[in-house]
Amino acid sequence: SGVETVARAVREQAGLRSVFHHHAAGYIETPEEIARLLALTNPELVGLCFDTGHYRFGGGEPVAGLRRHRDRIWHVHFKDCSPTIHQRSRAEGWDYFGSLKHGIFCELGKGDVDFAAVTAELRRTNYTDWIVVEQDVLPGMGAPKEFAQRNRDYLRKLGL
């Protein structure tokens, strides 16, 4: 009800629609939690910000998630997930912040999110809304501008 209350207020006061961004360490993380939230909320009021990296980190396969929730996806975040760090995170019991510190979310194309397949699925379903590239670069992890350029170059290879 809290999600709907906020979405309704935003729609009434600003004329904007609201999306829920699922997020590791944010109560709505796994594919099952995302599906439950969507089942409990009004589809005319609450959409989904589908985040490829967080969906993968939460145990899901992004293309399957896109297909499952396409009717509720109003915004997309492109984020990649390192399979090596993901495996270590699970094996060593790291929390989200420990995983983040070790570089769980890598540059696009360096993880196991299949962005060619994600892009093909978005095109197949005529997605025309925003896609935002998210890249976590914590202090000491590198130069954000260089990460952004490599992400942009990768997206150009995909025809975006």
Image (tube, grey):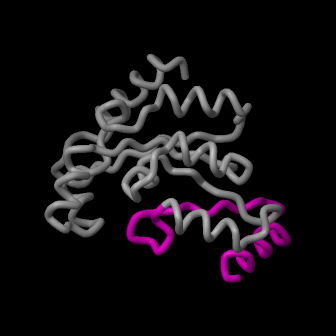
Residue at coordinates 26% horizontally, 58% vertically from top-left?
A: 100
Q: Quadrant of residue 36?
A: bottom right
Name the spot of residue 15 as percent of width and height, x first.
83, 62
Q: Is residue 19 magenta?
A: yes
Indicate the quadrant containing the C terminus: top left, top right, bottom left or bottom right.
Answer: top right
The residue range painted magenta reads: 1-30
35 left or right of 101 in image: right
Return the residue nearer the eye: 7 or 65. Answer: 65
Name the spot of residue 95 as percent of width and height, x first.
25, 69
Name the spot of residue 37 as percent of width and height, x first.
63, 70
In the image, residue 105 above or below residue 32 = above
In the image, residue 147 above or below residue 140 = above
In the image, residue 78 above or below residue 3 = above
Residue at coordinates 64% horizontally, 41% vertically from top-left?
A: 130
118 left or right of 81 in image: right
Name the spot of residue 12 as percent of width and height, x first.
85, 71
